[in-house]
């Protein structure tokens, strides 16, 4: 049976605050702070466990090997010899934000009836531009069944593609054909627009999507300038519901009209700027919640605790849940470590609609497996990392070995190669 499965990125042992993401206000604000990789990974695992307990299907992607020596070698250097900037770019744990791993078009939407996944090139940010090789390697193992899945290498540079963070799917139910919405940005503001229209169009073609059921919408310049470096910071969709900030899209009316024409049952829940400013929406990550359908059929938002701590946001949410809106439940999680680098609940997961039986079970979460990962993280992940500490070879060894042991424990030692 086709189900929505959330694949969360396990936070890697090198999680740190090197301030690498221009336009991501949290990453810039927390530059130089001491990170807590162990706590970060445990926070992510607690969210996975809670979603599993809620009756949702849960998978995971493994942290990538960091520092990425293969990438440094391509640049003619090594972790020892690299400049502090290059070394930081080689050591980020940014693959935890699995929403940027790939764009996923479920089987009911595609011409050949298979679920298509295109790894994102993430070319705009150096520290993320080398994720795709291992991402693709993991996806090739997890979704190896060619009968059910088609995997694609990234769209070539210079067309920036940030994966599912700039892609939404609206449908009557997950197993029904959907409308796929690709949200791109236009360069010109103070911050880079990471998703290029050319890349979105390429992915839609590669996945064999029907133009009648595809929408290309431009993200508003205002949202990018306010720090919404990905559209999933200002809008999220689930089944027939689009939950969005009023200022998310450049041509809001035109976009809504096209959606209504293509999916008459769409329900647009718009939060007005007068109730929640863009600044509050972005700092609280209201829209970076996971909007999910519970087994009861009711929808819930899985929120970061910053949403509860932002008065305008919490007021709006309580009024919505108290009224007749489609979102019926609010679940709040402590994800402070990921949030401090600009990654909320929805950044941490990649949604795949598929039959879990067709996926390599090594990537599927169970309570026992989460226990095992939790114990290993508690034992091996560094408690703290200061940015200056990234120069320490002992730290690289700890990070590489800790991840390697996780791969072995999960039966995925084939991921233990030095280069991808
Ligand atoms: O790409 N942060 C990530 C956060 C990604 C959030 N994902 C989604 N919105 N889907 C980014 O900006 C910070 C890394 C650093 O500064 O070291 C970082 O890469």
Image (cartoon, rainbow, N blue to C red):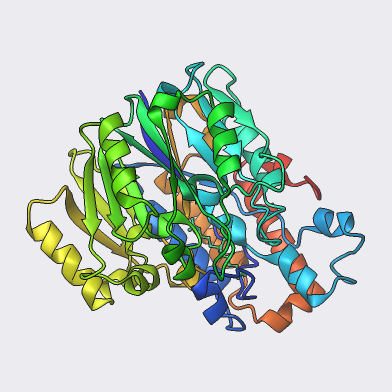
Q: In which quarter of the image is residue 272?
A: bottom left
Q: Considering depth in this image, is 387 or 253 the residue closer to the camera?
A: 253
Residue 80 image position (x, y, % from top left):
88, 71
Q: Considering depth in this image, is 215 or 203 the residue closer to the camera?
A: 215
Can I make out residue 65 in this image?
A: yes
Residue 134 image position (x, y, % from top left):
69, 45
Quadrant where the C terminus lies?
top right
- Quarter holding ligand 1: bottom right
Q: Say if 70 sits above or below 284 in the image.
A: above
Residue 258 image position (x, y, % from top left):
32, 37
Quadrant where the N terminus lies?
top left
Q: Considering depth in this image, is 22 or 117 the residue closer to the camera?
A: 22
Residue placed furthest toward the left:
323
Q: Which residue is drawn at 7% across and 56% down?
A: 323
Q: Which residue is drawn at 58% across and 75% down?
A: 383
Number of marks present in the image shown? 0
**In the visual, does 388 lie left or right of 315?**
right
**In the visual, does 226 lie left or right of 403?**
left
Q: Which residue is drawn at 23% across and 47% down?
A: 268
Residue 225 image position (x, y, % from top left):
48, 69
Q: Say if 218 sits above or below 282 in the image.
A: above
**In the visual, does 43 lie left or right of 82?**
left
Can I make out residue 347 in this image?
A: no
Q: Say if 157 sits above or below 68 in the image.
A: above
Q: Considering depth in this image, is 266 or 132 the residue closer to the camera?
A: 266
């Amino acid at each position: 049976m086709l189900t929505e499965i959330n694949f969360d990125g396990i936070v890697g042992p090198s999680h740190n605050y090197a301030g690498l993401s221009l336009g991501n206000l949290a990453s810039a604000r927390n530059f130089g702070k001491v990170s807590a990789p162990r706590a970060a990974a445990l926070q992510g695992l607690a969210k996975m466990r809670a979603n599993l307990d809620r009756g949702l299907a849960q998978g995971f992607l493994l942290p990538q090997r960091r520092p990425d020596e293969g990438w440094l070698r391509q640049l003619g250097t090594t972790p020892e010899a690299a400049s502090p900037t290059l070394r930081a770019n080689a050591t980020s744990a940014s693959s935890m934000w699995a929403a940027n791993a790939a764009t996923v078009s479920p089987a009911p939407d595609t011409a050949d009836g298979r679920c298509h996944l295109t790894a994102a090139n993430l070319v705009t940010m150096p520290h993320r531009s080398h994720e795709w090789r291992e991402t693709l390697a993991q996806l090739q193992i997890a979704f190896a069944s060619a009968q059910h899945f088609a995997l694609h290498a990234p769209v070539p540079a210079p067309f920036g593609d940030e994966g599912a963070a700039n892609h939404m799917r609206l449908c009557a139910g997950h197993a029904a054909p959907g409308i796929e919405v690709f949200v791109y940005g236009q360069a010109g503001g103070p911050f880079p627009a990471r998703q290029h229209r050319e890349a979105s169009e390429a992915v839609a073609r590669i996945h064999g999507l029907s133009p009648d059921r595809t929408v290309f919408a431009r993200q508003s310049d205002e949202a990018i300038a306010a720090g919404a470096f990905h559209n999933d910071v200002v809008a999220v969709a689930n089944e027939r519901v689009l939950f969005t900030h009023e200022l998310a899209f450049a041509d809001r009316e035109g976009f809504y009209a096209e959606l209504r024409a293509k999916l008459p049952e769409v329900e647009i829940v718009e939060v007005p700027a007068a109730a929640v400013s863009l600044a509050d929406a972005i700092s609280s990550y209201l829209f970076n919640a996971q909007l999910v359908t519970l087994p009861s059929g009711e929808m819930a938002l899985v929120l970061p605790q910053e949403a509860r701590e932002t008065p305008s946001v919490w007021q709006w949410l309580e009024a919505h849940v108290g009224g007749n809106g489609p979102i019926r439940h609010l679940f709040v999680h402590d994800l402070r470590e990921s949030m401090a680098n600009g990654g909320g609940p929805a950044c941490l997961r990649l949604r795949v609609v598929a039959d879990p039986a067709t996926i390599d079970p090594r990537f599927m979460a169970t309570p026992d497996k989460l226990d095992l990962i939790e114990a290993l993280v508690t034992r091996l992940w560094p408690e703290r990392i200061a940015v200056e500490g990234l120069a320490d070879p002992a730290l690289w060894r700890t990070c590489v070995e800790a991840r390697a042991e996780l791969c072995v424990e999960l039966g995925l030692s084939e991921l233990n190669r030095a280069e991808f």
